[in-house]
Image: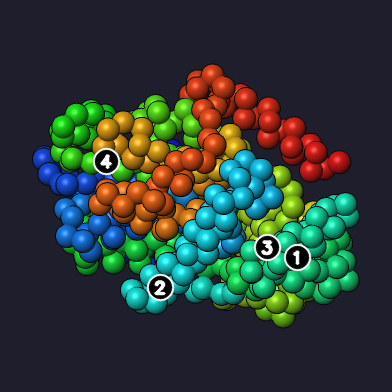
Amino acid sequence: MTEFPAAGSYYEAVNPAPPPRPRLKGFARADVAIIGAGFTGLSAALHLAERGVSVVVLEQARVGWGASGRNGGQLHPGQRLDQDELERLMGLADARRLWRLAEDAKGLLRGLIARHHIHCRYEQGLIHADHKPGFVAHAHAYAAKLREAYDYPHVEALDRERIRELVKSDAYHGGAIDHDGGHLDPLALVQGLADAAEAAGARIFEGFRVRRLIHGRPHRLQDGQGAEVEADTVLVCADGLLEGVEPAVESHVMPIANHIAATAPLGERLSEVLTSRAAVSDSRFVVYYFRPTPDGRLLFGGGETYSTTLPKRIAPIVRGHLLKVFPQLEGVALDHAWGGVLGVTPTRLPFVREVAPGVLTAAGYSGQGVLLGPMFGKILADAVAGRLEGFDLLARLPVPAFPGGTWLRKPILVAAMSYFALRDRL
């Protein structure tokens, strides 16, 4: 089981810890059992419960303990791949449907925040920063394409001078700003979704690690300590933290750990690095991402490891990446440093399938889960109700298994990521 420190993230410091939810002892029955209390699982639970479906959510630790409560909090429009690539892979019609779905995901997320009074500190603005001069022309052409071909007027091209007005770093040569992108506090969001799901009638059990999923009519989920849930349908929403439960998912989704830190409050010095409230994500394959926090810190993510065991000392890892972008922050304290495990797929597209009769999954967001997770949870709920349009579109996404399946996926991914990390530096 992945071990995260009991405290350490900035989000845990600014969000009051809710009381522990009950641990299941004995037997429970539900129409639908959901594995994982993150964005996807909780959104599915909320939408199902609002329709009168009996729902149990099983979380191996606490709500938001996985990537949903530990990520960079950025809201990137579209899918993980850009529309050019989706058009090549899926054809123009499906690429347009996927764009529309992502736009609908924005509306859904904003609606959930407003309707359930979730105080997750949502802010507008997302900058794409190109770390190589040769990338800038593509960023500008893509902004024009979104305006002209996708009726999306929110992206503004940035030349070298303009981006350096917004991001005070010599590391970037241009890019674009999406005024309809944004950022938020992901732990506050996931806690708000959990409260909403429970208010609608869903039951959430913490401390239930599914050790066995026995397919059948009904399905049975066991924790190996005497607790068992019986359900007609199972939604597997554990992303990179499934760990032995459903091989059909794990052969397509690989866990990687990402590292984040938050500086001490910078006061007026924050304007030495950022002059807007927009978040920033750069063009590296192993991406750097950062944003201002409401209390005047810089939250910075950088560096990955290919294990569900996090390094003991994360701050030095992040500091090295941070100073490559902002050497002027030499000596600034990092008050919080933490990591989270997310799921990636070979194509960076999410794996959405019915992996066995009555067992559905949505996983492998590859860093796009803040925007897509709540929508994909709703799509899973729709599929349970027999409304399959969204699910069938996502099931067409090309997501092959990792070569060699579960056993060889890690060395293959490590080799690929090492190659791309080297290419980032050249």
Up/down of 413 relative to 197, above or below: above
Which quadrant of the rendered structure holds the C terminus?
top right
Mark 3, residue position? 149
- Give the foreground label among 2 and 3: 3
Disc number placed over residue 144 in the picture, else none = 1
In front of the other: 209 or 312: 209
Spatial CA span between label 4 and label 3 = 39 Å
- Circle 4 residues within 10 Å: few <14, some 14–19, many ≥20: many
Q: Quote the CA–CA distance across marks 2 and 4.
A: 26 Å
- Residue corresponding to mark 4: 234
For the point 19% across and 34% down, which residue is it? 219
Q: Nearer the viewer, residue 332 or 425?
A: 425
Residue 417 sits in which quadrant? top right
- The earlier-in-sequence mark between 2 and 4 is 2
Look at label 1 and name its amino acid.
Ala
Q: Is residue 245 left or right of residue 134?
A: left
Looking at the image, is mark 4 or mark 1 earlier in the sequence?
Answer: 1
Q: Please name whichever residue, 209 or 7, is drawn nearer the observer in this view of the structure.
A: 209
Query: What crowding class fits label 2: few (fewer than 14 Cα within 10 Å), some (14-19), or many (20 or more)?
Result: few
Q: Earlier in the sequence, mark 4 or mark 3?
A: 3
